[in-house]
Image (spheres, grey):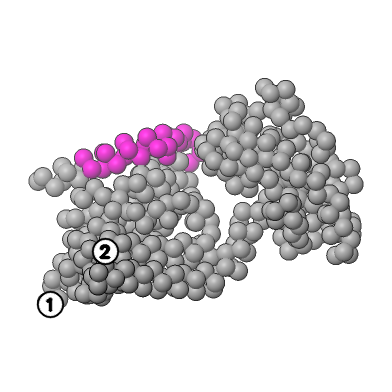
Amino acid sequence: MAKKNVFQEFTKGLWAEVPPFRLVLGLCPVLAVTKSVDNGIGMGVATTFVLVCSNVIISLLKSVIPKQVRIACYIVVIATFVIVVELMMQAYAYPLFLQLGIFIPLIVVNCIVLGRAEAFASKNGVVASLADGLGMGVGFTLSLTALSILREVLGNGTFHNIPVFGPTFEPFRFMVEAPGAFVCLGLMLCVMNMLGKK
Amino acid sequence: MREILKLFLVVALFGMFSGGILAAVRGSTQEKIDFQQLKFVKGPVLQDLFKEASNDPLTDRFKIMDDKEEVTCFVGVFDGTKKAVAIEGFAGGYGGAIGVIVAIDLENDQIMGIGVTTHSETPGLGSRAKDDPAFARQFRGMTMKDLFKITAEGGKIDALSGATVTSRGVAGAVQSVSEMYRRLKPSIMEKLKDKA
C-alpha cells in the first residue's frame, strides 16, 4: 500500500469525515461532556485510544472472526478496551474520571467506534486501520475541544479553569446546561455546512 | 451443527481472552484506585472537618460491619485522644445519590460538622449544598438523637432556596448516618479501644 493512501486515511478523519460534524455520529458524549475544555479533551483522548486499539485488533483478527458473530466479537474487543481506559483513568486521573463519570463506560456504545470497526477495520489492513482510527480519534478530539472551548468560555467565563474575562463578566450559564449543548452543536454544524458549500 | 459450534467457540474464546486481560488490569490498578477514591472524594472533606486534628483521618481508619455492609470510620485525634469519628452516608438528591460525611463527637454524640463528598446536583442551585458553608453549618451542634429534616417537613434545617430536593437529600443522608451511628456506637468504641 502506498504511503499517500495511509496519510489520506488519517486526514479524512480530520475534516472530510470528522465524526460529530460530518458523520453526525457519537453525539451523546459530544453533547454531554463538553462543559469544560478539560473534559472535552479527556473524553476525546479516551475515545481515540479505544478507537485505535479496537481498529488494530479487529483488522488483525478479521480473517478469524466468522461473519455471523462479528458484531458480538467487535463489542467484546471494544468493551475490553473501554474498561481498560476506565480503570486506568480511575487509577491515574481520578478527578477527570469523576467529571466524565458514566460517559466513559458509554464509549462502548459510541457509534463511531463500532462504525469504524464494521465499515473500515473489518475490510482493511492493519496500517490503514491504525491510520483511520487515529484520524477519526483526533478529529473527534478536536471537535470536542472546539465545542467545549465555546461552551466553557461563554458559559463559565473560564478557559481550562482560568478566568478569561475578569470579574465583571456575568457567565452565560445557559451554555453549560444541556440545552446550550444542542444550540452550540447546531450552530457549529451550520458553520461547517456553510464552509463546506463554498 | 459444526458451524454453530465454531461460532460458539470463537465468541467464547474472545470472551475468555478479554476476561483474562481485564482481571489482570484490575488487579494491578485496584490499590491505586482505592487510594485515589479516598484522596479525591473523601480527603478534602475530611481535612476540612478535622482541621484541628493532630492525625491524618485518611490513614487512621477502620471498617466495621453493619448488618451485611461494611462501614468505614475515620478517626479524629484531638489533644491526644481519639475524640471523633466521621462516617459517610447516602441519600437520593435531585440528580442522583448525594454522599455526606458526618463528623461526630464521641463524648456527647454531637455533630462537629458535615461535608458533601459526591453529588450530581444542578450547578448553581443544588451544588450549593457542597459550596455554601452556611447550609452545612446548620447541622453543627445537633445531636444524634435529633431528627434531620428540612423545615418544610417539620424539621429544623433551612432548605437552600431553589434546591429543596437537594436539601432534603443532604438531611436524609445525615439521618442515615445518625441511625447507623446509634446502631454501631458500641462496636466503634470497642474498635477504638482495641487500637489504642
Q: Is residue A173 visible?
A: yes
Q: Chain of mark 2?
A: A
List x then y, in percent, for residue A79: 38, 62
Residue that label 1 marks: A1
The magenta region covers A164-190
- From the viewer's perspective, is residue B8 above or below residue B86? below
Residue depicted at x 35% and y 46%: A28
Location of residue A66 by image quarter = bottom left
Q: How busy is the neighbourhood of tag 2: few (under 14 within 10 Å), some, or many (20 plus)?
A: few
Location of residue B125 by image quarter = top right
Mark 2 against mark 1, which lies toward the viewer? 2
Residue type for callout 1: Met
Q: Quadrant of the C terminus of chain B?
A: bottom right
List x then y, in percent, for residue A128: 20, 71
Residue depicted at x 53% and y 56%: A95
**SS assignment for the magenta stretch, majority:** helix
Instruction: Identify the secondary structure beneath mark 2.
Output: helix
Residue A39 painted magenta: no
- From the viewer's perspective, is residue A185 above or below residue A143? above
